[in-house]
């Protein structure tokens, strides 16, 4: 049995979404990590946030998982890349935490969002926790880059009320340059969700000089509009809140001089998406 979060010096609830958290499960033997990934009875979580109004519909409790296989050059939480930075927590304990908020979330038309990092790095844990939340009558959302979407069965997908899928760019070469990996699995996951008519939001990060090519965005918009299940597209302006994490981790941060997009630039991106018939905010 893995020692749970009592071995961590940090509380489960983060003080803010940009708190730097490192080495929270360094004490967990590799064999136990492998077992946890296999069974999903235990997961590795950067932190919990209660009362988020920006991570899905209504007021949300968010669990930020540790572990991500992408290396987005504008990632604002690079401390979530390594799974060993996360606090080990059993599904039972995470479910118990969630149950405390069940009534309040219902009143505030909210729910539970599983985000990261990339939650499907721990797909067994993700499936079990989302199913447990759903069983309690809590609205469930997963925020994912979709790369490991094929790890979820159709039945597991049906326990997720909303998928928030990050699409970074349309151009495959640019995608690889921005994230380190191929765009194909993300688009395949989007098509699969569409075929199953599962509700989806798309999240797009607008980074001046990197993702602000409006012809490229128009292609993403045409794809999203063709799916028929995209309820909303969120344009998220790039910011520098994660810069200190890159510096503290000794990572090469190439965007240190990039300014956030202007409100006009955000509006132009929304206009391109609306022109394709999408609800863009
Ligand atoms: S997918 Fe998300 S968590 Fe992973 S590197 Fe990109 S921005 Fe960071």
Image (cartoon, rainbow, N blue to C red):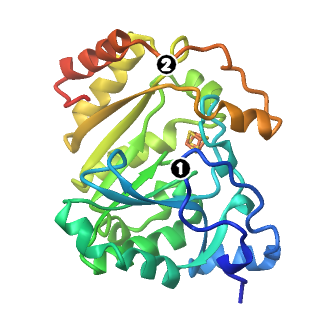
> Which residue lies at the image location 79% right of the left edge and 41% below the top edge?
249
Check the image and report above or below for 135 versus 211.
Answer: below
Q: At which x and y percent is residue 265? A: 37, 11
Q: Which residue is painted at 56% across and 28% down in the image?
A: 175
* Residue positioned most to the bottom: 1
- Whether 96 is drawn above or below 83: the answer is below
Quarter of the image where one finds residue 44: bottom right
In this image, 28 relative to 272: left or right? Answer: right
First in sequence: mark 1 vs mark 2 = 1
Q: Which residue is the site of mark 1?
A: 16
Q: Helix or strand or loop: what does disc 1 sit on?
A: loop
Which corner quadrant of the figure contains ligand 1?
top right
Residue 30 horizontal side relative to residue 4, left or right: right
Give the quarter of the image for residue 46: bottom right
Mark count:
2
Q: Position of residue 259 (x, y in %)?
A: 55, 14
Is residue 256 placed above or below 98 in the rendered structure? above
Please, what secondary structure does the residue beneath circle 2 have? loop
Does the Cβ of the disc 2 residue fall within 8 Å of ligand 1?
no
Residue in view at x 19 percent, y 31 percent: 279
Residue occupied by mark 2: 211
Left or right of 176 on screen, residue 53:
left
Q: Residue at x 58, y 51 (%)?
A: 117
Q: CA distance from mark 1 to mark 2?
A: 27 Å
Q: Which mark is residue 276?
A: none
Q: Residues within 10 Å of mark 1 (few under 14, many from 20)?
A: few
Drawn side of residue 238 relative to residue 245, left or right: left
Give the x, y percent position of residue 195: 26, 51
């Amino acid at each position: 049995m893995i020692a749970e979060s009592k071995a961590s010096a940090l509380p489960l609830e983060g003080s803010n979404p940009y708190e730097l958290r490192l080495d929270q499960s360094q004490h967990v033997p590799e064999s136990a990590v492998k077992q946890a990934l296999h069974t999903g009875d235990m997961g590795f979580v950067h932190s919990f946030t209660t009362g988020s109004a920006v991570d899905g519909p209504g007021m949300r409790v968010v669990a930020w998982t540790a572990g991500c296989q992408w290396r987005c050059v504008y990632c604002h939480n690079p401390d979530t890349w390594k799974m060993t930075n996360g606090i080990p927590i059993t599904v039972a304990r995470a479910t118990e935490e969630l149950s405390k908020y069940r009534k309040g979330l219902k009143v505030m038309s909210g729910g539970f969002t599983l985000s990261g990092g990339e939650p499907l790095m721990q797909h067994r844990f993700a499936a079990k926790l989302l199913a447990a939340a759903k069983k309690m009558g809590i609205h469930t959302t997963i925020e994912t880059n979709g790369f490991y979407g094929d790890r979820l069965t159709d039945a597991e997908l049906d326990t997720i009320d909303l998928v928030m899928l990050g699409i970074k760019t349309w151009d495959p070469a640019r995608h690889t340059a921005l994230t380190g990996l191929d765009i194909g699995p993300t688009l395949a996951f989007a098509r699969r969700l569409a075929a199953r008519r599962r509700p989806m939001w798309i999240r797009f990060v607008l980074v001046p000089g990197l993702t602000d090519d409006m012809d490229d965005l128009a292609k993403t918009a045409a794809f999203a509009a063709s799916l028929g299940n995209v309820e909303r597209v969120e344009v998220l302006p790039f910011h520098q809140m994660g810069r200190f994490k890159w510096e503290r981790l000794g990572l090469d941060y190439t965007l240190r001089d990039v300014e956030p997009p202007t409100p006009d630039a955000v509006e132009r991106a929304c206009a391109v998406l609306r022109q394709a018939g999408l609800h863009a905010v």
